[in-house]
Each structure stands twice: as C-alpha cells, then as structure tokens.
Image (spheres, grey):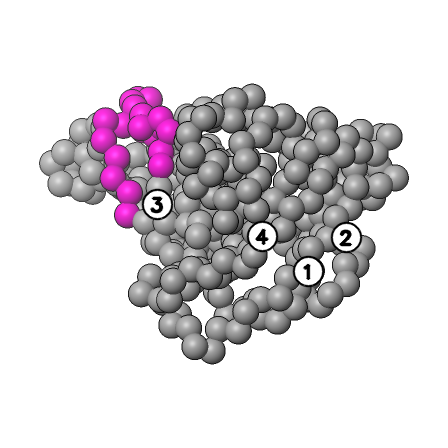
Amino acid sequence: MWSHVHGGNIVKTVSRQTVQASDRSKLIGAEFFCRTIISNSGTSSNSNVVLRHSVEDVRKIQGRYTLSFYAKSDSPKNMAFEFSQVFGTGGSAIAYITPEKVQLSTEWQRYSVIIDVPDITDKTIGQNSYCQLMFWFSGGSDFNLRTGNLGLQTGTFDIAQAKFERGDKMTAFEIPDPVVELLRVSRYYEQIARSSNFITSFHLTFNGYMGIIPIARKRIAPAVTISPITAFFLYPIETAATAITVTPREENLIVFIRGISPTGYGDSRIGGMYPQAFIAVDARL
C-alpha cells in the first residue's frame, strides 16, 4: 500500500484531491489524486519527503517491470524515482537500483520508468522482506546517491494512477474494484470506528473483554493505537473505561476493559465506542 513519509525539519501537507472535469480526458476514470505540498523543505542534510509503496515478499518481483504514473507540479521541477529490494530481518543488505529523475510540468503528463530488477539467487532472504517503490519530492545531501542529487525542494506535487506491471511497455491504467482494494489494503492497515459489542466481566473488579474482528487478517500481529484512551463505554450507566489493554493477533483483537464494578462474578455489560473514537490497526511493512 502507499504511504507518505518524511524526515528532517520539513513542513508538508498531504491530501486527497478531486480530479477536475477539465482533466478527465487525461485521467480517464480517476476520481481523486494525491497532492503533496512542501511549504518548508528544511535545511538539514537528512531532510526528505517521499511517497512510497511496498510490495510484500521480495521474491515476487523479479525480471523487467514498468512503472507508469501521471504527475504534475506547480512549476517545472524534478522528481526522483527509486526502487529497492529489502531482504528483511536477518537477510542480505538492502539493494538500491540506480535512481531516475523526471521533470514535471504544470500539466498532467504520463511518465514511465523501466526497471530491471536484479536477480536474488545469491541473496539471503529474512523475515518481512519486500520491494519498495519511492517517489522523492525532496531529498537532502544524505540521499544524493538515492535521488540522483535531487536536492531540497518546495512546492506542490500531484500524483495519479500509478501502475507497476511486468514487461517493458506501459499499458492503460485499469480502474480497480474498490471492494477488492479495501481488502488488499486492510491486510496492512485499517481504522476501526464506532462499534457495539457484548462484554462479559469476571472477578471482583471489572475486567471485561470484547473481540474485534478486522476487515481482513493482518500480515503480522499489528501495532494498535486507541484514540482516545477513553474510547470505550459501558452500559447500563454510560461509564468511560479507565484502563484498556489490547492483545493484537493477526486474525483479531482482544480488548480488555476496566471501568465499572460488576454486581457479581460473571456479570455482563453492553459496551461500545464513542462516535469520535477509533482503533488504528497497523501491520504495514
């Protein structure tokens, strides 16, 4: 899945923008595109702004591939592209392919880059290996070898309809089924919003639990963030939880909640989450 990262003392905003009617003849079928605005590129050598996509299991991507995408910027400027092979924990060192730069204009244009992925026969593959595609919008001198001396930049960068396919020719972009894409993305990340569940308590102080089944089984046992920590409440008296412990699993989350005294052993309560609350479940590469 795509994700946005940065480093150093930069200031940026990332947003989903709606494709204008005047651009639909080029971006056929597209509803949205990704916009990155760098208002301050920073001054440190490790400052960077990157849009990246990771493909699970480095063994899946071998041979010749073509990356194509539509892009534009607020004024003519360069953007660098990088491909790398990450061999995972206990594996060989990361292999970087020589970066390429493209010059963007103020109008949507389709670009393509041919990638000859190195053979991995002599590599050691560890756990959680992956290949990574990276669009560099800005990069300090620490990254010169990886960006082709791109340098620090400010401005607006727009990306749409990126496609990575086997072979040396780019083909027409295919609009994905949103249901299928949601399932694919949910293997790596999802936000669980308001829900109601049945909670059972035990012992002399409340220690209730509820099981949450995500959209898709996660790649690994995920990291879990609950916002806010008082997200859960209990009936019959709407009482916010005072402590929450989560046991994350690949297939589900077990949420242990403390916040109200039961009437006795095995007492039951109905609980849920406040409307503004969410649980972030993160198993990204």
- Gap between marks 1 and 2 measured at Cα: 16 Å
- Sequence-wise first label, 1 or 2: 1
The answer to if 233 sits in the magenta stretch is yes
Between the residue at mark 3 and the residue at mark 2, the CA separation in whole angstroms equals 33 Å
**Is residue 176 visible in this depiction of the protein?**
no
Please name the amino acid that badge 2 sits on: Phe
CA separation, marks 4 and 2? 23 Å
Q: How far, Cα to Cα, is label 3 from label 4?
A: 32 Å
The amino acid type, in three-letter code, at marker 1 is Ile
Which comes sooner in the sequence, label 3 or label 2?
2
Residue at position x 48%, y 65% in the image: 57
Mark earlier in primary sequence (4, 2): 4
- The span shown in magenta is 225-247
For mark 4, what is the residue? 99
Give the residue type at disc 4: Pro
Residue identifier under label 1? 114
Asked if disc 4 and disc 2 are in contact, CB closer than 8 Å, the reply is no
Side (left or right) of 276 relative to 226: right
**3 vs 4, front mark:** 4
Pick whichever, 71 or 54, lies toward us: 71
- On the image, numbered disc 2 is attached to which residue? 173
CA–CA distance in space, label 1 to label 3? 35 Å
Q: For residue 93, say whether it is visible.
A: yes
Q: Which residue is mark 3?
A: 223
Q: Is residue 250 magenta?
A: no
Of helix, strand and loop, which one carries label 3?
strand
> Tag 3 or tag 1, which sits nearer the N-term?
1
**Sequence-wise, which precedes: disc 3 or disc 4?**
4
Q: Which circle, 1 or 2, is nearer the viewer? A: 1
**Measured from the top left, where is residue 169 in percent x and y?**
77, 63
Q: How many marks?
A: 4
User: In the rendered structure, which disc, 4 or 1, sits on the residue that comes first in sequence?
Assistant: 4
